[in-house]
Amino acid sequence: MAEKEEYCLDFSKRGKIYFVGIGGISMSGLAEILLDAGYEVCGSDRDRSAITRGLEEKGIKVFYGQKYENITKDIECVIFTAAIREDNPEFKATMDLGLNYLYRSELLGQMMKNYRKSIAISGTHGKTTTTSMISEILIETGMDPTVNNGGVLKSMGGNTRVGGKEYFVAEACEYTNSFLHFFPKVGVILNIEEDHLDFFKDLNDIRSSFRKFAQLIPEDGFLVICGDIENYHEITEGLKCRVVTFSTGGMDCYGNKTDYSAENITFNKFYCGCFTAVGPEGRKEIKLKVPGDHNVGNALAALAVSDGLGVDPIRAIKGLENFTGADRRFEYKGEVNGFSVVDDYAHHPTEIESTMRTAAKIEHGRLFVVFQSHTYSRTKVFFDDFVKALSTADVVIMPDIYSARETDNLGVSSLDLCNALNDLGTEAHYIPEFEKIEKYLLENCTKGDLLITMGAGEANKIGDALLKDRS
């Protein structure tokens, strides 16, 4: 990408803003916020989708196909994602016309400046769910947050909520150091693991990025961080803000007691956690409506944020217990021919392991997993970890790797993953076409079986198609 001095959007004016890739989950949310603020908003995307149709219904002009002629001189600012390259025709037109432009993360950061208390939730895993939990709490308690989330929250009817000017809640992704453009008053770091190694050099490089994120929080703010993160003091040492720790086990990596912990953890038949949250504000009995042991930790982080903001504890618990999950986070979609369909966004080995643990706790027959690996670089780096994580399924089906922004396959394929799984004794099938995967599932899944469509690509379309065909 071209180097540039960051343009500052003047929020006192209401010009024309153009989003390249407006159908993305985060871009669409930002577009809605600016539309509500009185801007003329338009943009482009490759294909029509439920998101773009929703934007059009709100009065936003959407161009299908990213074309040079879509960019016109009357545009005040063009918004790009980090995935847009210099050979993109709309990027080239923007440069040729000398228009102002921002990347998505820069726009999001500038928006944060307009709110007294911005809350940014980061981590390799769990960002969307924890962002949703915090949003649900603030909505329940009448704090009227503006929200930009990475997933759809049922109570909001989307991934975005336009609220008041006091609270802004946003998911904060580390990829390309995006979250370093933010201005959080409150920060959350859920975990730090290797990921996005097409950008970061190694884990130390990733930790350095999270350290810089933590340093963004001002003295009158606070950071909530998981005490299980190895040597997390490297992230928090010397920070001006208050640091709050949490861990489900109650002890951090140094053997010290964390500020928040969970006691008496049990799980119901749907593997939803029930536990006693222990913190500086006392003990709170929590009954979650989302499955998975990992969500106990996410809930602790959300409670630490709500306590730090001075939220009424009784209403905070109600908000947390109202949360039934974000879309694509072990989301039950329905039943086809007697077998259940669940969709999950898991695309990192650690996330897959969590999803598989959750599935193992729920009564079912055979476990079928349709997994679409996301990017060649991630597949290559975590190849053995993917195979290990998926090996607990009874049957794994894989379409081609979802390339996203990448063009070099790095010599790795879904067939390679399937061959490695078969070598371990796990039945695995490489089926490139979605239609043939649907046919295979209808012929092989029987009553009582559980099907999980998994990945950050388009595997969810398979489950949706199965359910639509049977509706």
Image: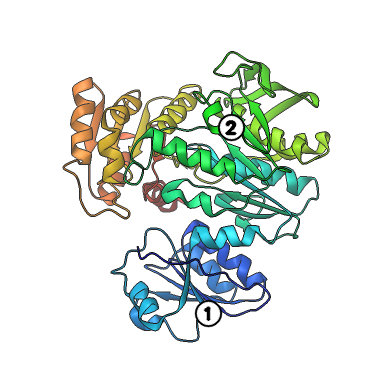
Q: Nearer the viewer, mark 1 or mark 2?
A: 2
In the rendered structure, which amino acid carries the disc numbered 2?
Thr
The amino acid pointed to by label 1 is: Glu
Give the labeled residue for mark 2: 236
Which label belongs to residue 76? 1
Q: Nearer the viewer, residue 234 or 403?
A: 234
Residue at image coords 55%, 63%:
107
Quarter of the rendering occupied by the N terminus: bottom left
| N-term-proximal mark, 1 vs 2 | 1
Where does residue 108 sit, x and y in percent of width and height?
Answer: 57, 59
Query: In the orientation shown, which residue stands out farthest toward the front?
Result: 238
Q: Which mark is residue 29?
A: none
Q: Where is residue 146 in the image (x, y as percent from the top left)?
A: 68, 56
| Residue 119 drawn above or below residue 420 | below
CA gap between label 1 and label 2 equals 39 Å
Taking depth in this image into account, of 33 and 257 the one nearest to the observer is: 257
> Residue 27 in the image: x percent, y percent?
51, 62
Residue at 61% x, 23% y: name it. Answer: 247
* Residue at (80, 40) in percent of width and height: 311
Q: Is mark 2 on a helix, strand or loop?
A: helix
